[in-house]
Amino acid sequence: VYDHEKNTYKKKQWNQYVKTSKYYERVMKKLKKLEIGQVSFSYNLDFNPFLKTNTRSHHRSENNEKSVEYVQRIHDLFIKESFGVVSYERHDVDHDFIHMCNSSFFVPSGGGLSRMIVQMVKLKGRKVVKGE
């Protein structure tokens, strides 16, 4: 979770959306053992973190610069390790959810949506690859 006040990511055990580069390095090793040479990234930057204001209400942050930077860094890690990155045109979250549930191999990030997709992928008898 990105903490805008401290300008850094903070880790929460119950809700960790951001995985480290070490996580993805372990994922890449596992994918190579499975002879997977191409990956695609599905993500949505419209779900920005909420910021607290002086009132009790919250508003969405319009600054997703850190999220874009994070996604690009993960993308670059895969390119550096000679993975082909297949372009995936993002759609609305429902379409993306269905797309990910039908993956032959799924690499989860953090958060509840990934946990649900993991369950669906397993129910379909397909493979979940984690960097843990």
Image (cartoon, grey):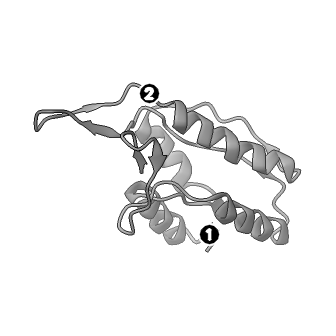
- In the image, residue 44 sits, relative to residue 77, either above or below, namely above
Which residue is pictured at 83% across the width and 72% down the height?
Answer: 33
Q: Quadrant of residue 130?
A: bottom right
* Of 35 and 45, the residue lying toward us: 45
**Going by the image, does 118 lie left or right of 132?**
left
Q: Secondary structure at mark 2?
A: loop
Which residue is pictured at 56% across the width and 58% down the height?
Answer: 19
Q: Secondary structure at mark 1?
A: loop
Which residue is pictured at 55% across the width and 46% down the height?
Answer: 99
Q: Residue furthest front?
A: 6
Amino acid, disc 1: Lys
Q: Quadrant of residue 111?
A: bottom left
Amino acid, disc 2: Asn
Q: Residues within 10 Å of mark 2 (few under 14, many from 20)?
A: few
Q: Residues within 10 Å of mark 1 (few under 14, many from 20)?
A: some
Q: In whole angstroms, how far apart are the C-alphas of marks 2 and 1?
A: 29 Å
Q: Which residue position holds label 2?
A: 63
Q: Which residue position holds label 1?
A: 130
The label on residue 61 is none
Q: Position of residue 27 (x, y in %)?
A: 71, 65
Q: Position of residue 1 (x, y in %)?
A: 42, 51
Which residue is pictured at 47% across the width and 58% down the height?
Answer: 114
Nearer the camera: disc 2 or disc 1: 2
Quarter of the image containing the C terminus?
Answer: bottom right
**Going by the image, does 121 lie left or right of 104?**
left
Q: Residue furthest top?
A: 62
Q: Position of residue 5 (x, y in %)?
A: 36, 40
Q: Position of residue 23 (x, y in %)?
A: 65, 65
